[in-house]
Amino acid sequence: MELQSLYYALAVILVLVGIAGVILPALPGLPLVFAGMLLAAWAGGFQQIGWVTLVILGLLTLLSIGVDFFATMVGAKRVGASRKALLGAVLGTFAGLFFGPIGLFVGPFVGALLGELWHGREIGQAAKVGLGTWLGILLGTVLKLGLAFAMLGLFAFAWFV
């Protein structure tokens, strides 16, 4: 197998793992997508993908990191979440990984709810915080998926045109 083909295969793996990482919290999603695209551009001698495209892809990657923090914080702060609720949401997301797709959706909510109860809130307020935090995480995931597909589209356009 030619070395260039190996680089392309590794680039595809990085992009696919990165797309999974947009949904799974343990992986740095869009930075991995960008790394895969950068590797593919390098393997092709930057013939199809130039520096302008790479700068735009890099900026979209940075934007995704901001979106992730912003969406989660807005959802949590809007309903008055405590630090324990945010910690609970993160831990709940990781615990949810073991329960498949349903766990990914329920885990952050349950984690934030338990964090608020640990903080000493009433069950009604804790449920409100859990829902607000979960909605923020969901919004961030949807926005990051949009950015991932925009990056893929821009890369494909630059590669084939």
Image: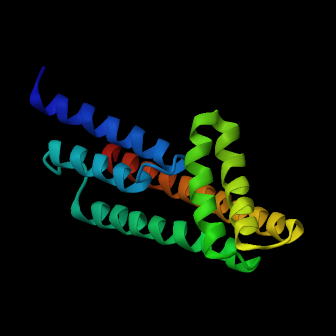
Q: Residue shown at 55%/52% (left/top)?
A: 145
Residue 6 in picture, x, y percent from top left: 18, 30
Q: Residue shown at 73%/68% (left/top)?
A: 116
128 or 37, nearer to the observer: 128
66 or 86, nearer to the observer: 86
The quarter holding residue 75 reads bottom right
Q: Residue shown at 75%/63% (left/top)?
A: 130
Please indicate whether residue 34 sits to the left or right of residue 49 in the image: right
Q: Residue shown at 66%/55% (left/top)?
A: 108
Residue sticking out furthest to the left:
3
Residue 106 in picture, x, y percent from top left: 72, 47
Where does the N terminus fall, quadrant-wise? top left
Residue sticking out furthest to the right:
124
In this view, 71 is above or below 90 = below
Residue sticking out furthest to the top:
1
77 or 35, nearer to the observer: 77
Q: According to the image, what is the colour scheme of the structure?
A: rainbow
Please indicate whether residue 113 sits to the left or right of residue 33 in the image: right
Residue 29 in picture, x, y percent from top left: 43, 51
Q: Please count the marks in the image.
A: 0
Residue 36 in picture, x, y percent from top left: 30, 46
Please indicate whether residue 65 sits to the left or right of residue 114 in the image: left
In this view, 36 is above or below 108 = above
The quarter holding residue 53 reads bottom left
